[in-house]
Image (cartoon, coloured by chain):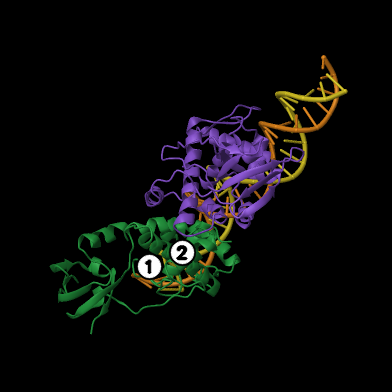
Chain colours: A purple, B green, C orange, D yellow
Amino acid sequence: MPTSIKENYLKALHFLSLQSGVVSLTELGNAMEVSKPTVNDMVKKLAARGWVRHERYQPIQLTPEGHKAAALVIRKHRLSELFLYQVMGFGWEEVHDIAEEMEHIKSELFFQRMDELLRFPVFDPHGSPIPDKAGNMVTPSYQLLSHITSPCCVVLKAIRNSGTEFLKYLNEKNLQLGIELKITSIESFDGSISVSYGHCEQLVMSHSVSSLLWVEVVE
Amino acid sequence: MPTSIKENYLKALHFLSLQSGVVSLTELGNAMEVSKPTVNDMVKKLAARGWVRHERYQPIQLTPEGHKAAALVIRKHRLSELFLYQVMGFGWEEVHDIAEEMEHIKSELFFQRMDELLRFPVFDPHGSPIPDKAGNMVTPSYQLLSHITSPCCVVLKAIRNSGTEFLKYLNEKNLQLGIELKITSIESFDGSISVSYGHCEQLVMSHSVSSLLWVEVVE
DNA sequence: CTTCAAAGTTAGACATATCTAACTTTATTT
DNA sequence: AAATAAAGTTAGATATGTCTAACTTTGAAG
């Protein structure tokens, strides 16, 4: 049985290994805000349970079982977020922190009922895919708004960061998932992007904002 | 901050001290299913935090702060039970175990929203009172069905034990809160009670069943 | 191809929550 | 009042998750 601390290590390993597939001890330690010896010990325990592969001085890799265990925690997290949003009426900027606690509830019944009530949803309130009971999730091929190189129309599909502050910023600007953004200009020197949408004539987004928004180009 | 383990000790202390106001180390150890030295250590920690009063070789007593801390955990538990029952559609026999996990969620926002959605309820699905945010709860003056001495009509108001097995038994017999029971006879030698209600002509309840049902006499 | 900083490991420590075995105190029983 | 069982305490051990300080390995730069 993974303790909730081990579940958090698994989640961190999952997200950190998205790019290269492997994770360094130091990276994991930074993500979990613990020292290197702590990570080192924990990685041994995770390896003993078959969730990671690790050889001395080598980077860490999640095993298929580790990936599945991580996905099932992420499933609980994202189902919780959607439940908080849809059933309990929380704002999308409030759900992450509460879901961070709910994801460690062990009762399978609880999440099964949630899943049913929400009609087996595939996306959470931030547009992230919800893994199914087997730990599989869809992998939409969105692009980061910051990667768009020429003016076009895009639809906002997902938010890369579910931190409260950033979501509050989006609320202020009336930016919700599904909204259509018309890109009017791209400043190549600082990467800022001007968009218009809804009742907003022009919003200039810095690169640090546009790099957190997943979009889909409208043909 | 009480860890979830300390919260469980506080709950146990609350329930065990209902009768006499004090609790022995041994009683608490039995309730928590831990050894006496473990209880002894924990009691020192609880005392250090001001939740219990304890002198060597003397019984343990919750302080007012301890009582309040316990009541706030019980509040989270009972709110969760009602939420699971009313909003999520669980049966009253399913909610206890899930609420046992939910009660340790720290987010105040979560329980505040629950409270609002449920319209500030005063009783959980088993008829137990829900403490308010200050830790105060109503104390209804019900009687145990097993204490009734002469045939009369009573209304089932609360269940003393929220264990799954007992509640499933009540489900089978179609016994719900609010139902009116006509007591037709009382066997003084074994304490069994015959009742009729709803579509049931006669049900003979053993003392062990009737001593778990809180009722109110109908005038 | 040596040097050296970054990455990783080891050793030893601490806090929490638990245990068993042995000892002390309290209170009841004769 | 002495004996004794029950209740409570102490001592010493274990598991988990964490730390700092010191040491080793790896790999990149000169």
Image coordinates for residue B158, horizontal then vertical, percent: 31, 71
Image coordinates for residue B218, horizontal then vertical, percent: 23, 81
Q: Earlier in the sequence, mark 1 or mark 2?
A: 2
Q: Is residue B102 left or right of residue A55?
A: left
Question: Are discs 1 and 2 located on one and the same chain?
Answer: yes
Residue A182 in view of the camera: yes
Amino acid at the residue labelled 2: Met
Image coordinates for residue A130, horizontal then vertical, percent: 47, 43
Residue B34 in view of the camera: no
Q: Look at 40% across and 62% down and name the residue there.
A: B83
Badge 2 marks a residue whose secondary structure is helix
Check the image and name the residue furthest to the bottom: B219
Which sits in the foreground, A187 or B106?
A: A187
Q: CA distance from mark 1 to mark 2?
A: 13 Å
Amino acid at the residue labelled 1: Asp
- State which mark lies toward you, 1 or 2: 2
Q: Quadrant of the N terminus of chain B?
A: bottom right
Which sits in the foreground, B80 or B88?
A: B88
Q: Look at 36% across and 61% down and name the residue there.
A: B85
Q: Quadrant of the C terminus of chain B?
A: bottom left
Instruction: Identify the mark at residue B114; answer none if there is no mark.
Output: 2
Chain letter for mark 1: B
* Residue position for label 1: B124
Task: Identify whether B43 is placed above or below A134.
Answer: below
Which sits in the foreground, B23 or B91?
A: B91
Badge 1 marks a residue whose secondary structure is loop
